Image: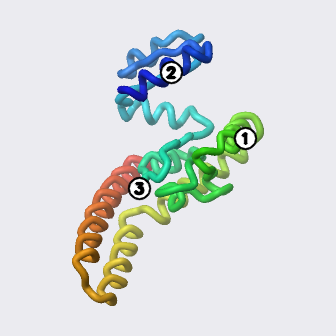
Amino acid sequence: MGYHKELVELAGGLGLRSATTKTIVTALSVPGDVEVLFLLSVPNTLKDLLLRSARLLVYTPAHEHFGIVPLEAMLAGLPVLACNTGGPTETVVEGATGWLRPPEDVAAWTEVMDRAVHGLSARELEAMGRAGVERVRARFAEEQMAARLDAVFDEMADRPRSAVGANLLVGLLGLLVVVAGVTARLLTKGTG
């Protein structure tokens, strides 16, 4: 909640009218002159509505371990702007499904946002959206994740054993199981 308070104060300091909502009912009742809407604990229905109505998802975490949010956006056919660190470097393809920019380069982020909102045609955005859907289905579906996990196990089996390697294997296995489960849920939701 500290970040939320800081962001509300920042918006106010910039002279922007803001509102905060926690439910779909309160989000729908926000006055039209609100310039910044803070959504806390976004329900899936509202999240899906927002993804369908947006032109760009801006994903700001730097060094994120994987990041399910960009996959959700791409599966919804939405281009993604994300940090060029961590998980998004594996999920977002520069210029094809979105853009990757250094977290500290405000001008680069601004340029991409302006281009996505004002410079790209509906056809160009749709093409990026289709590429994102195809990428998620081709690279992050259950079968592909299982094949990648098998490859990791094969590679690790060929190396000398160590305590660090065993701990890394357990951690990697846990992460891949979580990612595969979430991805399977996303793909099921995206096709249903």
Residue under circle 1? 111
In the image, residue 157 above or below residue 6: below
Query: Which residue carries the number 3 mark?
Result: 65
- Residue 157 vs 84, above or below: the answer is below
Label of residue 19 in the image: none
Figure check: 150 above or below 65: below
Residue 2 placement: quadrant: top left
- Image point (51%, 37%), residue name: 51
Residue flagged by tag 1: what amino acid is it?
Glu
Q: Earlier in the sequence, mark 3 or mark 2?
A: 2
The residue singled out by tag 2 in the image is 37
Residue drawn at x 61%, y 17% as measured from the top left: 14
- Judge from the rendering whether residue 2 lies leftward or rightward of residue 53; answer left or right: left
Mark 1–mark 3 distance (CA, rounded to whole Å):
26 Å
Relative horizontal placement of residue 2, taking residue 96 as reference (left or right): left
Q: Nearer the viewer, residue 62 or 39?
A: 62
The residues tagged by marks 2 and 1 sit, at their Cα atoms, a distance apart of 22 Å
Identify the residue shown where x is 36% and y is 64%. 142
Q: Position of residue 47 (x, y in %)?
A: 43, 34
Residue type highlighted by circle 2 = Leu
| Foreground tag (2 vs 1) | 1
Q: Amino acid at mark 3?
A: His
Label 1 residue SS? helix
The answer to which of marks 2 and 1 sits earlier in the sequence is: 2
In x, y percent, where is residue 20? Answer: 43, 18
